[in-house]
Each structure stands twice: as structure tokens, then as C-alpha cells.
Image: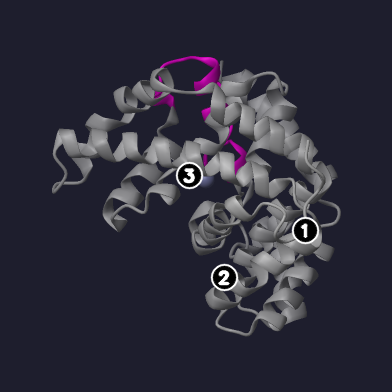
């Protein structure tokens, strides 16, 4: 294992890592929890040896890596988050199912507009961050979600980084084909301008792009706090339309607010595990 890096430690990889941050921040409103959080949750539910499941848990957001047309993007997201049961049973599919928006990890994000659900961790934190920074709830949500993945990365970094890297390496043509078999036909049905072949190639491209991105993201997770802040702040600044110093302050405030993430995420993992057993 290389020493925990500072900026420039991995010159050849820094560009790819930066791309990952761009992905996470730019896609944050649609992402809910980031890949580090999903990997953390699935490892709690199924154990860290379930490598295909760990990759499967990050995959429902794979449309983000592929930069597809918005209509295709929305249709894929709907399928992967709400019709995940189309995937043929396997360890990979079980991991994939832990992510879902019905009873999976993503169900516990995006609750801030609903005061009835003010007990949700994400709701409380997003509201507190918005009050502290003056950011809108939408933007506070983006910063909160980026900070949560950074938090998990900082506290579980090298270990979780290795897990995500090994998980990405463990999957290949078999899992890619399973995704095509499950989702290509309904995707083509729902996006009129997409032929069956287009739908299949969009899914294959997204799968491969996500696999490559997760390997770069794994390297990023092994970095230290200063590296993440220096890389993340200017990119976040562009998204928030403020300067890098202000973005860094927002990010630091969010990191501080979610210092108690672990207890809450362990509780969430228990609920996801119980729902998974009930579905089986
Ligand atoms: Zn998601």
C-alpha cells in the first residue's frame, strides 16, 4: 500500500480521480448516497467478502458515469432504483437490491422537504447545514451528500478503497450481461427514440464506465482530508457558483455536521438487512 497521499502523489491518476469528484458533485442531486456509503452499507449487511455484491450496490447510479441523454438517464434510474427485482437472483443482484429507493439505502435519503420525516438523519443534517451556511436546501443536500462520502472515505479510507477496487475487478461480462438481460428491453420500451440495440449498448457502456470509475474512486478514497478538500472545493465551487474558499467552508461545515455518520448508517444497514431478509 502506498502512503496516504497528498496532492500530486498519484500524478497519473489525479485526473481520473478529479473526474470522479466531478461526477459525485455534478450528479449529487440524483445520486442520494455516494458509492462509498453504498459500499459501506452492503459490507455491513452481507460482509466484505461479497465482492460482486459490493459492486452491485454501487451500480444503480451507473447512468452517472456514462453521461447519457436525460431521457435515457431518467429511465435507467427508475429501473435500477424501483424495478431492481428484474435482475436475475445472484450475490451481485442482492448487493444491487440493497441500494433501492423503496426499502434500500436510497430510501433513507432525500427526505428533507417532508417535515413528517424530520427524524431522518439526512433531513436533519441538510436542514442544519442550510441554516448554518445560508445555502438552499437543494444545494445543502448536494454538499451534505458529497461530505458523507468524504467522511466514510476518511474514516474507512484504505480498507474501503481496497474493497471497492477489488469489487470492481471482480465483475465482468457475466454481470454486464445480467444487466442487459434485466433492463435493455424495458429501457427500449420506455424511451421511444431508443432501439433495442441502442438500449443494450447504452447499458453496456454505462456498466464499463462505472467499473472504470469505481477503480479510480477507490484510489481517491485512500487519500487524506487535505487532498480531498483541495480537489473537491474548486469543483464544488463551480456547482454552488461561489469561490473555492467559500465552497471549502461549506464542505468543512458539512463534514463537521456528519461526524456522527457511523452510528446512523449502521442503524440504516440493519433496516436494509431486515428488509432484504423479509423480501427473500
Ligand atoms: Zn441511487
Image point (35%, 51%), residue name: 74
In the image, taking residue 71 as reference, residue 83 lies left or right, namely right
Could you classify mark 1 by the number of other residues whose Cα lies within 10 Å: few (under 14), some (14-19), or many (20 or more)? Answer: some
SS at circle 3: helix
Marks 3 and 1, how far apart at CA: 29 Å
* Sequence-wise first label, 1 or 2: 1
Q: Position of residue 36 (x, y in %)?
A: 66, 43
Is 257 in front, or is 53?
53
SS at circle 1: loop
Q: Which residues are magenta?
A: 85-107
Q: Is residue 147 visible in the rendered structure shown here?
A: yes
User: Which residue was labeled with disc 3?
Assistant: 61
Is residue 90 found inside the magenta-colored segment of the image? yes
Q: Position of residue 240 (x, y in %)?
A: 57, 77
Q: Is mark 3 within 8 Å of ligand 1?
A: yes
User: Which residue was labeled with disc 2?
Assistant: 138
Marks 2 and 3, how far apart at CA: 19 Å
Could you classify mark 2 by the number of other residues whose Cα lies within 10 Å: few (under 14), some (14-19), or many (20 or more)? Answer: some
Q: Quadrant of residue 2?
A: top right
Image point (60%, 65%), residue name: 142
Q: Position of residue 163 (x, y in %)?
A: 69, 30
* Sequence-wise first label, 3 or 1: 1
User: Which residue was labeled with disc 1?
Assistant: 6
Tags 1 and 2 in contact by the CB under 8 Å rule?
A: no
Please, is residue 227 above or below residue 32 in the view?
A: below
The mark lying in front, picked from 1 and 2, is: 1
Amino acid at each position: 500500500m502506498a502512503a496516504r497521499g497528498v496532492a500530486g502523489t498519484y500524478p497519473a491518476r489525479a485526473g481520473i480521480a478529479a473526474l470522479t469528484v466531478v461526477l459525485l458533485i455534478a450528479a449529487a442531486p440524483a445520486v442520494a448516497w455516494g458509492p462509498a456509503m453504498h459500499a459501506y452499507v452492503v459490507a455491513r449487511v452481507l460482509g466484505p467478502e461479497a465482492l460482486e455484491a459490493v459492486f452491485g450496490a454501487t451500480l444503480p447510479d451507473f447512468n452517472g458515469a456514462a453521461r447519457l441523454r436525460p431521457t435515457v438517464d431518467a429511465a435507467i434510474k427508475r429501473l435500477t432504483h424501483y424495478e431492481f427485482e428484474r435482475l436475475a437472483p445472484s450475490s451481485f443482484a442482492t448487493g444491487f437490491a440493497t441500494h433501492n429507493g423503496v426499502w434500500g439505502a436510497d430510501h433513507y435519503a432525500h427526505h428533507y422537504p417532508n417535515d413528517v420525516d424530520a427524524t431522518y438523519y439526512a433531513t436533519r443534517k441538510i436542514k442544519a447545514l442550510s441554516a448554518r451556511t445560508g445555502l438552499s436546501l437543494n444545494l445543502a443536500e448536494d454538499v451534505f451528500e458529497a461530505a458523507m462520502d468524504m467522511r466514510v472515505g476518511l474514516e474507512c479510507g484504505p480498507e474501503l478503497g481496497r474493497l471497492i477496487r477489488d469489487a470492481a475487478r471482480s465483475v465482468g461480462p457475466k454481470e454486464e450481461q445480467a444487466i442487459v438481460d434485466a433492463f435493455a428491453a424495458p429501457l427500449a420500451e420506455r424511451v421511444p427514440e431508443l432501439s433495442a440495440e441502442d438500449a443494450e449498448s447504452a447499458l453496456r457502456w454505462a456498466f464499463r464506465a462505472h467499473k472504470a470509475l469505481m477503480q479510480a474512486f477507490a484510489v481517491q478514497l485512500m487519500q487524506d482530508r487535505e487532498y480531498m478538500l483541495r480537489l473537491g472545493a474548486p469543483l464544488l465551487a463551480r456547482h454552488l457558483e461561489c469561490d473555492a474558499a467559500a465552497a471549502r467552508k461549506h464542505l468543512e461545515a458539512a463534514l463537521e455536521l456528519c461526524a456522527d455518520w457511523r452510528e446512523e448508517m449502521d442503524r440504516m444497514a440493519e433496516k436494509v438487512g431486515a428488509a432484504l431478509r423479509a423480501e427473500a
